[in-house]
Amino acid sequence: AQSVTQLGSHVSVSEGALVLLRCNYSSSVPPYLFWYVQYPNQGLQLLLKYTSAATLVKGINGFEAEFKKSETSFHLTKPSAHMSDAAEYFCAVTATGNQFYFGTGTSLTVIP
Amino acid sequence: NAGVTQTPKFQVLKTGQSMTLQCAQDMNHNSMYWYRQDPGMGLRLIYYSASEGTTDKGEVPNGYNVSRLNKREFSLRLESAAPSQTSVYFCASSLAPGTGPGGYTFGSGTRLTVV
C-alpha cells in the first residue's frame, strides 16, 4: 500500500523567499512520486515527477524536488517565491501507475 | 484544444436524484480516472479504467457506477444522490498506466451539490 503525508496544510512565504513544501511517503514497493499544483477553480497540473531516474527532479516554473529514500521524503522547493506561485500543491504516490494516492494538500500564500 | 473535457461544470441535485457526469479526452490516452476532492481530504480515486473495456474500483466507489463508453469517454453515474456526495469531481487521463507511469491530465472539474 502507498500513502503520502503533507506536513503543513497552509504555508506562507514572502515574495522572493524560499518555498519549501514537505511530503513524506510510505510505499512497500519502489514508488513513483509526483507534485501537482491547483489554481482556484481549476484542475490539477503536473509540476514534476520522480520515476526512479535522477533523484533531483526539476519541474516547471522553477520548482524542484529531491527524492530521499532514507528519509522517505520528496519535498518541493523553489529558491524564490513569486506571487503567481500562490496555489494549492498536492504530493502523490503510485506504484502501478493506476492508483495514485494524493496527500491532503498544502495551500501556499505568497506575501508581497 | 487538446485535453480532458468535463460536463457539466456545476450541478445541484436533490437527494435521491440521479445524474451522469461526462468526461472525454482527445489525447488518445488509454487510461481514465474519476476522483473526488473534498476539503482536507485531498483527492480520492472513485473508479478507473486502465484501458478501453475495463473498469476497476478505487478507494471510494460506493454509490457510483462508471462506463467506459469508448477510448475517449468515461462517464460517472450517481444513481441516487446523497448529501455526502457533495464534492468536486475530477476526471483525468494518462497515456500508459503500468509501463512507466506518467502524470495525469486533469479536467477542470464538476462542482456537485446535493441538497
Image (spheres, coloured by chain):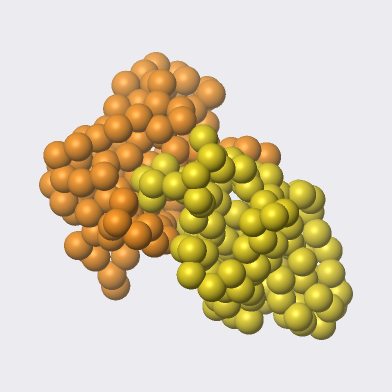
Chain colours: A yellow, B orange
In x, y percent, where is residue A9?
A: 76, 49
In x, y percent, where is residue B102?
A: 39, 62
Residue plotted at (67% across, 52% down): A72
Q: How many marks?
A: 0
Residue B75, above or below A57? above
- Taking the image as shown, residue A34 lies to the left or right of residue B81, namely right
Residue B34 visible in rendering = yes
Of residues B64 and B50, the one nearer the viewer is B50
Residue B61, above or below A14? above
- Taking the image as shown, residue A104 lies to the left or right of residue B58, namely right
- Taking the image as shown, residue B3 lies to the left or right of residue A40, namely left
- Taking the image as shown, residue A66 lies to the left or right of residue B11, namely right
Residue plotted at (42% across, 61% down): B103
In x, y percent, where is residue A12?
A: 83, 63
Residue plotted at (55% across, 51% down): A92
Residue A45 visible in rendering = no
**Quarter of the figure with residue B2:** bottom left
Residue B1, above or below B19? below
Quadrant of the frame with the N terminus of chain B: bottom left
In x, y percent, where is residue B65?
A: 30, 27
Residue A63, above or below B9? below
Residue plotted at (53% across, 69% down): A48
